[in-house]
Image (cartoon, rainbow, N blue to C red):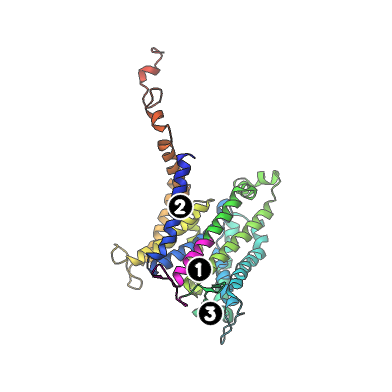
Amino acid sequence: MSRTVILRILTGLAAVAAAFAVPFYLDGFWLQAGLFAMSAAVGAIGLNLLTGATGQLSLGHAFFLAVGAYAYVYFGSEPEGELGGLGLPTPAAAVLAVLAAGVAGGLLSPIGGRLKGQYLGIATLALIFFGQHVLFNATPVTGGYNGRAVPPLELFGFAFADSPGLVVLRVPFGALERLWFLSLAVLAGAALFARGVLRGRPGRAMNTIRDHEIAAGVMGVPVARYRAGVFLLSSMYAGLAGVLLALAFQRTVPEYFGMLLSLDYLAMIVIGGLGSVAGAVAGAVFVSLLPQVLTRYSDALPLVSEPGTGGLSPAEAARLLYGVAVVAVVLFLPGGLAGLASRTRSVGHRWFSPGSARRRFSPSSPETTSPESTSPETT
């Protein structure tokens, strides 16, 4: 194997080892921030399939996250007072929640198959206002303004909760530590599936639709069918992200699933890199962790104050930085963080590949050839 392949394998193994070691060293604040980032990464992958790979603008991604989160809570909770529930086993509730988000996307897929660009963006924008109205008023299902508690997931008798107690290598494993490994597995599966889609025939068809719709139709690609299918797949990814988010947050709050969340997801895929699975993950980590970092260190950062003190809050400062990052990406780095990583790898490959030093310093190389040796008089 070449040095590049070996280096890539070693880097991947180091990243996996670091991800598995995180629960043994970080406190609950950073573990919960990491869970938010992983759930956002799953949702960003789905939106990148729709917007980055197919060229369909969607401003209603937060609606499908809300469908997944609240469907899981309703399917998995027991009826209590005015709150309803089906009391299903939580694994079945999670699967049904993802399917519910897919059904919602399927009902709207004819619109996604026929509209494009800003027209689809305006149409999906209406989903946010419709979803907010339902979340605040369908109290037996959503709990209204107060939201609902999220039932912990229990898989094969193993509960992703603080009890019963579990100690691994003298480290107590509560709900956050257990959910960490579950979220890692879900994120890895979602990323591998999306990567397979993008590298296969569907991915080539999606990219053709994005780059030249008329040419795709002439080549025999069913444009409307592909757009509708990607819209449905993206909504299922959002539903899965909503389930992970509900499990990490442990309570569903209607205000969270608003316009700002959809804009955050657009910032994720633009900053990370449109059409790239790794870029979606990187952008989600950046956008999700930045407010947490500003919140944790607000007392030591200039121009940032704690929420409620009258100054610039960490969330507002984070969104200002998102805007700056989006402008910088559009102007100077069209490929986003994924494009930057690709350029860095290509430069490193040219400099550190076998024979690179020999080529740079050989007499026939451009760097060492003198002007006299290439002049007409000397030749």
Closer to the observer: label 3 or label 1?
1
Q: Is residue 39 visible?
A: no
> Mark 3: which secondary structure?
helix
Q: Quadrant of residue 351?
A: top left
Closer to the observer: label 3 or label 2?
2
Amino acid of disc 3: Gly
Q: Quadrant of the C terminus?
A: top left
> Mark 2: which secondary structure?
helix
Q: Which residue is mark 2?
A: 13
Kindly report the distance in space between the C-alpha atoms of the residues bearing marks 3 and 1: 18 Å
Kindly report the distance in space between the C-alpha atoms of the residues bearing marks 2 and 1: 27 Å
Kindly report the distance in space between the C-alpha atoms of the residues bearing marks 3 and 2: 45 Å
Amino acid of disc 2: Leu
Query: Label 1 crowding class (10 Å Cα cut-off): few <14, some 14-19, many 20+?
Result: many
Residue 314 x %, y %: 37, 66
Q: Which residue is mark 3?
A: 144
Q: Which residue is mark 1?
A: 245
Residue 137 x %, y %: 56, 79
Furthest residue in direction front, as rendered: 169
Q: Residue at x 41, y 61 (%)?
A: 21
Q: Earlier in the sequence, mark 3 or mark 2?
A: 2
Query: Label 2 crowding class (10 Å Cα cut-off): few <14, some 14-19, many 20+?
Result: few
Does the CB distance between marks 3 and 1 fall below 8 Å? Answer: no
Residue 54 x %, y %: 60, 52
Magenta-colored span? 162-186
Residue 289 x %, y %: 41, 62
User: Relative to the observer, which residue lies in front, 299 or 344?
Assistant: 344
Q: Residue at x 38, y 31 (%)?
A: 357
Q: Earlier in the sequence, mark 2 or mark 1?
A: 2
